[in-house]
Image (spheres, coloured by chain):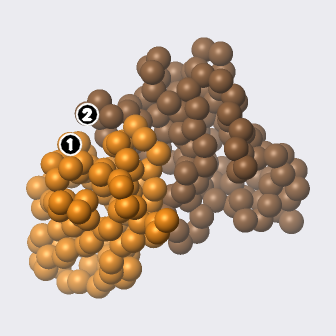
Amino acid sequence: KAGVTQTPRYLIKTRGQQVTLSCSPISGHRSVSWYQQTPGQGLQFLFEYFSETQRNKGNFPGRFSGRQFSNSRSEMNVSTLELGDSALYLCASSRYGLGDTQYFGPGTRLTVL
Amino acid sequence: DAKTTQPNSMESNEEEPVHLPCNHSTISGTDYIHWYRQLPSQGPEYVIHGLTSNVNNRMASLAIAEDRKSSTLILHRATLRDAAVYYCISPNNAGNMLTFGGGTRLMVKP
């Protein structure tokens, strides 16, 4: 069974720009969650989507948004990028949600200049 | 989610057992304890999970205290490839976000 895939793997943007990251979950998984990982803050939860609906949300500003499509693929968008948004963005999928085993993708490394 | 507490780092010698502790004193009665690990330059990967009884799989064993306020991940024979950050979490679906603490960085010496 193919694992979770994320595209692109690496991205460089400048302040003020926006970015869209993509995540394809494991087949049959309806939950996709997103995380930001930085050296200073560790692994922080952004939000979870289940069957195209945002079900849980972390403490991030509204510049961070996401959506999920009918095939469970998910995108995350960050608008008006700031230097502090430089991080590894991870997505994870599971069958039933956050209480279930999470399968993580390799992440997208975003650098904001 | 229950808050979990882990040591920042631990060291082990190759081929020796490693016991990674985790405190989760606020865990509710129905929440599982999950362990994940993150190898360098990779996303976290699932290791093991359990509710009340001790659990074993091909990667590790999980020993859960009788009062469920703590657990220990046991790697029976550490290898260099086990060097990673190990996270203990106790998530649930009930509208709570998945909270990873700082984890324990395991260093394995040859």
Question: Is residue A73 something one can see in this rendering?
Answer: yes
Residue contact at pointers 1 and 2, CB within 8 angstroms = yes
**Label 1 packing within 10 angstroms: few (<14), some (14-19), many (20+):** some
Q: Chain drawn orange, letter?
A: A
Considering only vertical position in the picture, is B65 above or below B13? above
Distance in Å between CA atoms under marks 1 and 2: 7 Å
- Of residue A42 and residue A103, the one placed in the foreground of this image is A103
Considering only vertical position in the picture, is A92 above or below A113? above
Q: Which mark is residue B95?
A: 2
Considering only vertical position in the picture, is A19 above or below B88? below
> Which tint is chain B?
brown
Q: Which mark is residue A55?
A: 1
In the rendered image, the quadrant that contains the N terminus of chain B is: top left
**Residue B31 quadrant:** top left
The x and y percentages for residue B43 are: 49, 64
- Of residue B99 and residue A84, the one placed in the foreground of this image is B99
Residue A72 lies left or right of residue A26; in this view the side is left
Q: Which mark is residue A4?
A: none
The x and y percentages for residue A70 are: 18, 60
The x and y percentages for residue A65 are: 15, 59
Q: Secondary structure at mark 1?
A: strand
The numbered mark 2 sits on a residue in which chain?
Answer: B
The x and y percentages for residue B66 are: 65, 16
User: Identity of the amino acid at label 2?
Assistant: Gly
Q: Secondary structure at mark 2?
A: loop
